[in-house]
Image: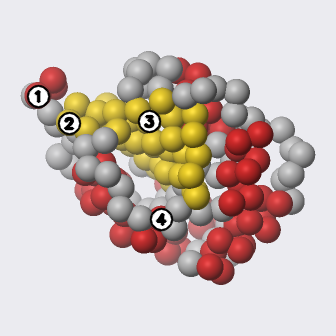
């Protein structure tokens, strides 16, 4: 994990002084609600975390990179936004805590069950990351960090799918789904 943290810290250090990137465009196109607690897992510089706060969520961004989080905090204009550095390989997400859980361009298969259980009944998960099509455009990309066809759907097969795109031509697959609960049974 230390090597990963060092690599990400170096990568983000090169972005010091750059403006905050735009939030994920597919995330911005979703109906996500406007309140509750949202978690942005693997948040990087916090563009999506800040976006979730602008919608009205108490937004939490978690990442392993201290440098990325330092930069994210410089853009923190929302009182409903906070960031924390965690080793996601050894971090237990709280159970049934989040009304919205967002993961963009981050893949850690060991966290999937924890992600599923961290979403409150009736809450949403938005997951968007690289699929096998990405390897066509970036052949040096580590294939361990791309989704197989249908993998995202299998992880959340008992959730209600609201929106999805799993085409490899898009290079990124996504899923917006609601965890079953009393409100949507």
Residue topped by disc 1? 182
Report if the CB atoms under discs 2 and 4 are less than 8 Å apart: no
Residue drawn at point x = 57 percent, y = 40 percent: 82
Pick whichever of labels 4 and 1 is earlier in the sequence.
4
Q: Secondary structure at mark 1?
A: helix
Task: Please give the name of the residue rendered at 35% of the width and 62% of the height, measured from the top-left corner.
Answer: 92
Q: From the viewer's perspective, tell me whether residue 84 is left or right of residue 148.
A: right
The reply to whether residue 119 is visible in this rendering is no
For label 4, the residue is 88
Image-quadrant location for residue 120: top left
Q: Which percent across, then down, holds residue 130? A: 53, 57
For residue 86, side relative to residue 90 (left or right): right
Q: Residue furthest front?
A: 79
In the rendered image, which residue does mark 3 sit on? Answer: 38
Task: Specify few, some or many for label 3: CA neighbours under 10 Å numbering under 14, 14-19, or 20 or more.
Answer: many
- Residue at 51 percent across and 34 percent down: it is 59
First in sequence: mark 1 or mark 2? 2
């Amino acid at each position: 994990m230390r090597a990963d943290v060092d690599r990400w810290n170096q990568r983000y250090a090169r972005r010091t002084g750059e403006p905050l990137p735009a939030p994920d465009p597919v995330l911005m196109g979703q109906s996500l609600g406007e309140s509750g607690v949202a978690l942005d897992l693997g948040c990087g510089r916090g563009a999506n975390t800040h976006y979730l706060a602008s919608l009205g969520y108490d937004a939490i961004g978690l990442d392993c990179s201290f440098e990325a989080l330092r930069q994210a905090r410089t853009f923190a204009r929302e009182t409903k936004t906070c960031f924390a550095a965690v080793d996601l390989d050894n971090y237990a997400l709280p159970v049934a805590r989040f009304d919205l859980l967002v993961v963009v361009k981050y893949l850690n298969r060991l966290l999937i069950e924890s992600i599923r259980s961290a979403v409150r009944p009736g809450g949403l998960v938005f997951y968007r990351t690289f699929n096998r099509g990405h390897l066509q455009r970036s052949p040096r990309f580590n294939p361990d960090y791309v989704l197989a066809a249908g993998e995202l759907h299998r992880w959340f097969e008992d959730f209600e799918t609201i929106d999805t795109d799993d085409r490899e031509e898009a290079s990124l697959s996504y899923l917006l789904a609601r965890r079953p609960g009393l409100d949507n049974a």
